[in-house]
Amino acid sequence: MTVEQAVSLVTAADEEAKKACKRRWDSIAKPLNSLGKLESYLIKIAGMTGTSAISLEKKALVVMCADNGVVEEGVTQTGQEVTAIVSENFLKEQATASIMCRETGTDIFPVDIGIAADTNIINKKIAYGTRNMTKGPAMTREEAEKAIMTGIEMVGELKEKGYKIIATGEMGIGNTTTSSAVVSVLTGLPVENVTGRGAGLSTEGLGRKINAISRAIKINRPDPEDGIDVLSKVGGFDLAGLAGVFLGGAVHKVPVVIDGFISAAAALAAVRICPKAREYMLASHVSKEPAAAMLLEKLELEAALHCDMCLGEGTGAVALMPLLNLACAVYNGMSTFQDINVEEYKPLA
Ligand SMILES: Cc1cc2ncn([C@H]3O[C@H](COP(=O)(O)O)[C@@H](O)[C@H]3O)c2cc1C
Ligand SMILES: O=C(O)c1cccnc1
């Protein structure tokens, strides 16, 4: 199947299921709308899955791990060998996201979609890292399509295994550089407005990063209307794989949670490929990376958490899971006005 064929299967969220979920919330014996986003998240999930019966017991985090050739330009504080080390640590509960997964009962699926070394995590490797995008396209269009399909297929497989919600994460030294490039092209905003210090970069390093992104966009001239073109020329295997996970959520009707800036950049690319995919996304937190809040606005999504996190790996998305589980517990377990013999709220005149 091609990406085009896969996204042709996407349909809009189910409005009837959303209404049924809202009716259930309104019948629960508490002030109307008083659980705020905890209510609206579940209403969205009902629309995505097509049913007001919601269970979020089985949760997955998919971490797309890859190396980025642009690291050669001195745009990161650490070397690219860190990608493979942290990626393998996910399976040993020695990476931040894996510890948060353990605590929240989320199963972690780290995927080698293009690390520049052999690893022992899920092997979906397309190449040993991308090419340096300041010298030409990071990858071919075929490679980008393959990475996107990898993400779409992973969601299908996880749904078959019974997972009800998927958090997105990534590990890839240099991927805030590719993310800012993708965001600048897709939004038309100047590079310097959408570029931050990533995992920690000196002011001099930030200048080099902005310069490298500007050169990459100039030499590759990605077409902003074509999300696959943008991902292939100035993105990475990690971003393309994540865009695939978002598209897979829409294809397979599984809620997918956005993490921070990098994950949101991939989400924006997914929406450019398939606008309806937005309806299958949930925002988790507002990353401290400077353009993160703007990016969520572009996606027309609101995040519940403002924790000043900017770690990636899926940490913000996983942090949302306990809140969603609390929402679900109330939604499924709480008594209604009828149960306690109290008159229901009437809509205000
Ligand atoms: C030890 C370490 C662990 C990480 N875990 C996530 N990231 C985060 O930092 C990287 C992006 O930042 P940049 O574009 O500046 O390289 C990604 O791998 C992201 O997940 C890490 C970064 C480091 C150094
Ligand atoms: O917001 C993020 O996803 C992020 C920001 C900086 C470094 N790593 C991840």
Image (cartoon, grey):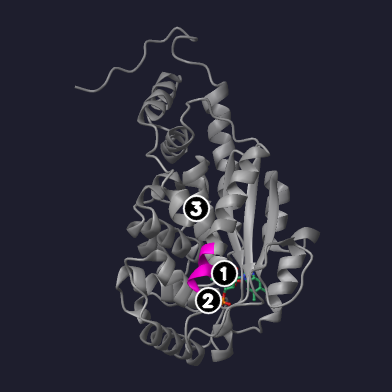
Q: Which residue is mark 3?
A: 246
SS under mark 1: helix
What residue is at 55 percent from the left and 52 percent from the top? 152
The quarter of the rendered structure image containing the C terminus is top left
**Mark found first going from the N terminus, 2 or 1:** 2
Q: Which residues are magenta?
A: 140-145
What residue is at 54 percent from the left and 74 percent from the top? 175
Q: Which residue is mark 1?
A: 237
Residue sitting farthest toward the top = 341
Q: Residues within 10 Å of mark 1 (few under 14, many from 20)?
A: many
Q: Is residue 214 above or below residue 115?
A: below
Residue 203 shown left or right of residue 171 in the figure: left
Residue 74 shown left or right of residue 57 in the figure: left
Camera-side residue: 292 or 62? 62
Whereabouts is ligand 1, in terms of quadrant? Answer: bottom right
Q: Amino acid at mark 2?
A: Met
Q: How many marks?
A: 3
Q: CA distance from mark 1 to mark 3?
A: 14 Å
Q: Amino acid at mark 1?
A: Phe
SS under mark 2: loop
Q: Residues within 10 Å of mark 3 (few under 14, many from 20)?
A: many
In the rendered image, residue 76, in percent from the top left (x then y), is placed at: 57, 83
Residue sitting farthest toward the left = 349
Q: Which residue is mark 2?
A: 139
Give the image quarter of residue 4.
bottom left
**Mark found first going from the N terminus, 1 or 3:** 1
Mark 2 and mark 1 in contact? Answer it, CB < 8 Å: yes
Q: Is residue 4 above or below residue 137?
A: above
In the rendered image, residue 239, in percent from the top left (x then y), is placed at: 52, 66
Q: Main secondary structure of the magenta part?
A: helix
CB at disc 2 and ligand 1 closer than 8 Å: no
Q: CA distance from mark 2 to mark 3?
A: 20 Å
